[in-house]
Amino acid sequence: MSDTPFLTIRNLHASVAEEELQILKGVDLELKAGEIHAIMGPNGSGKSTLSKVLAGHPGYEVTEGEVHFQGEDILEMEPDERSQAGIFLAFQYPVEIPGVSIANFLRTALQAHSEEELDLFDFQDLLLEKMELLEMDPAFAERPVNDGFSGGEKKRNEILQMACLQPALALMDETDSGLDIDALQIVANGVNKLKEENPEMTVLLITHYQRLLNYIKPDFVHVMFDGRIVESGGPEVALRLEQEGYRDWKEAEAAG
Amino acid sequence: MSEKIIEGVTDALNAEAVTAASQGEPEWLATRRAEAWAVYEDTPMPTTRLEEWRYTDLEEKLDLAALALGSAPAIADDPAAYPAEVREAMDADHEASGHLVMVDGHVVHTDIDDSLAAKGVVLSSLKAAVETHPELVQKWLATEAVPATEGKFPALSAALWTDGIFLYVPRGVRLDLPVRVTRYYAEEGVATFSRALIVAETTSQVSYVDEILGAEMEKQSLVSTTVEVVTQDGAQVQYVAVQRMGKGAFYQSHQRTLAYRDSTLDTLNVNLGASVSRVDLNAQLLGPNANSDMLGLYFGDEDQHFDHNTSQDHVSPHANSDLLYKGALDGKSKAVFRGIIRVHPGAQQTDAYQTNRNLLLSEDAVADSLPNLEIAADDVKCSHGATVGQLSEEELFYLQSRGIPKQIAERLVVMGFLGEVLSRLPLGGVVEKVTRAIDEKLHGPALLD
Ligand SMILES: Nc1ncnc2c1ncn2[C@@H]1O[C@H](COP(=O)(O)OP(=O)(O)O)[C@@H](O)[C@H]1O
Ligand SMILES: [Mg+2]
């Protein structure tokens, strides 16, 4: 792990572009290359919004603050440019793309990431290897992206894409929800394997449950509440949340 | 007595022209033309007051009075003499059982596999078939499928057609490879009337691909085609028309398919070109277990106008029809889809479906969709549905978040949307050609080939 700041989020404010609804109210976060961070927080606290803002979703407007990724200001970059720079978002709710096969989709994505012309056979080898890693049936590659997939299949497909694109920064938004324990283990093993292959990969896990953190061990755990990071610490924070929930913050909020 | 104004009679389209067209033809045909002309004169020009023409104002879109009859000479039957677009289209084709090339209304080439010809398969110009197969042409031309009485354009076509395509497949003969027709229209300021007559006898099988190309036109031309397809008991026919004419053309196609007992008669109409494109398609389900898949795909840009008017007539019980028309519209283009399923009295156990979906790619594009049902039997399964939607921001963001630039992401979504239609009738070569043609219209370079 190096000491150079890899991802720096400072005083990030964001609102829903069309509604002036403020969701992120000053997020501060710093990740160093190779670290694994987890963000936990109650429903509606802004975790998904943070991940989408980092990936460049056009539905949110950054009203204040800054985000630097590997020293570069990314807020003006298009989502595809951010991806090409090495940011990957595993969606909480993956989107269905009817009529576009996983193979075609991933081949197009990989081609966009590459300067040279992608070799079709190399691509097929890569895809098969990664599908095997995630224990997916190769026939899956011909199915339209997420169309008619079960919740678990969608999540696995997210990690397949991540495995193929090999990002420098993986944002994983509730990848564990909707997975049964076997699938969770397969996905977690897949992520750990990628991390082994590329120790510099930085991971930001968003989760509700301690469960995932038994498989993918975070270096740091942050608590998000009402659009801010309200506590940061080591893995023990997750264990405490598991016991106590978000009572303290909720009480404070109720007290005004 | 006041002089009667006959709508649609012009300097070029008139009784003398009908007489001229009949020159040298057998008596029955000359009579049929004359009768058709009489129907034409008696039929008013369709206006937007008619439900079926509500969205296509002929007064605004078609200047009939400005049109001459086509007079371009026939080119030589030599690929070197073909327009480059025709050569390119034919070079890109996969194998075929036979070819027919038509340029500005003239059939300039036909060929058919020797062994098929020996079995009695006929692929020829319609004009030639009048001489070589008079009994078949007399039986089917503008009679049961699209008679003159169908309307103004069918009457005009029956009176003034100059040539066309005749395809005949005898009983039990099956063609492994499609028959390919390549047409090209470049003459400006003219009206051209062509017909296609396809007869598939009992248990025969054939697929037919009609590629309709053309040059950009400064002066409007009317390209009128009438299509009659007959599948006898147990026969299987796939009819595909891919219209990629140049802007400036008014493409008008009136089609009817007759599907008898146990037959399969599938159609695919792809409309990408021309300034105005009006297709009337009527599928007749005339025997038990007749089956018609009716597929349509259109992609509009600039100020293109598409009008699809379809009907599914379930005359016989126990038949199926399934229609899927999908279109994407960019620029200021407009599309209207009007479809009706008619289940006739006694047509029990009909399965009939109708779906029209539109994707608007620009704020100025418009799609109207008017699906309809008319059911006079009680034991049927019918449904219809229509949607008009926009590109989904979530879909585009998802693709972009994987590194795919926006333009290519849009292309993927559009092709995924339209691809469903092509995947239902994946004839060799057609999918690739249509995909490439849509790519060109999307202006976006494909990232992958
Ligand atoms: N596009 C949007 N339009 C309206 N409200 C939104 C939108 N996105 C998020 N929100 C609201 O912002 C809050 C935070 O949502 P989200 O980031 O999804 O929270 P979390 O992932 O922590 O559950 C919620 O109250 C949610 O309803
Ligand atoms: Mg969330």
Image (spheres, coloured by chain):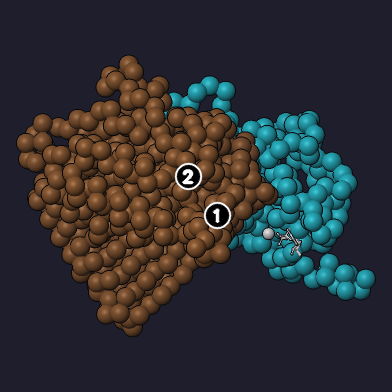
Colour used to depict chain A in the structure image: cyan
- Chain bearing tag 2 is B
Neighbour tally class for label 2: few under 14, some 14-19, many 20 plus, Cα within 10 Å: some
Neighbour tally class for label 1: few under 14, some 14-19, many 20 plus, Cα within 10 Å: many
Residue under numbered circle 2: B10
Tell me where residue A42 appears, x and y as whole percent. Answer: 73, 65
Alpha carbon distance from label 1 to label 2? 21 Å
Residue under numbered circle 1: B56
Sequence order check, earlier mark of 1 and 2: 2
Depth order, front residue of B261/A17: B261
- Left or right of B100 in this view: A173: right
Tell me where residue B408 appears, x and y as whole percent. Answer: 57, 37
Amino acid type of the residue that numbered disc 2 sits on in the rendered structure:
Thr
Count the marks: how many?
A: 2
Residue B13 showing in the rendered view: yes
Depth order, front residue of B407/A184: B407
The residue positioned 79% from the left and 71% from the top of the image is A247
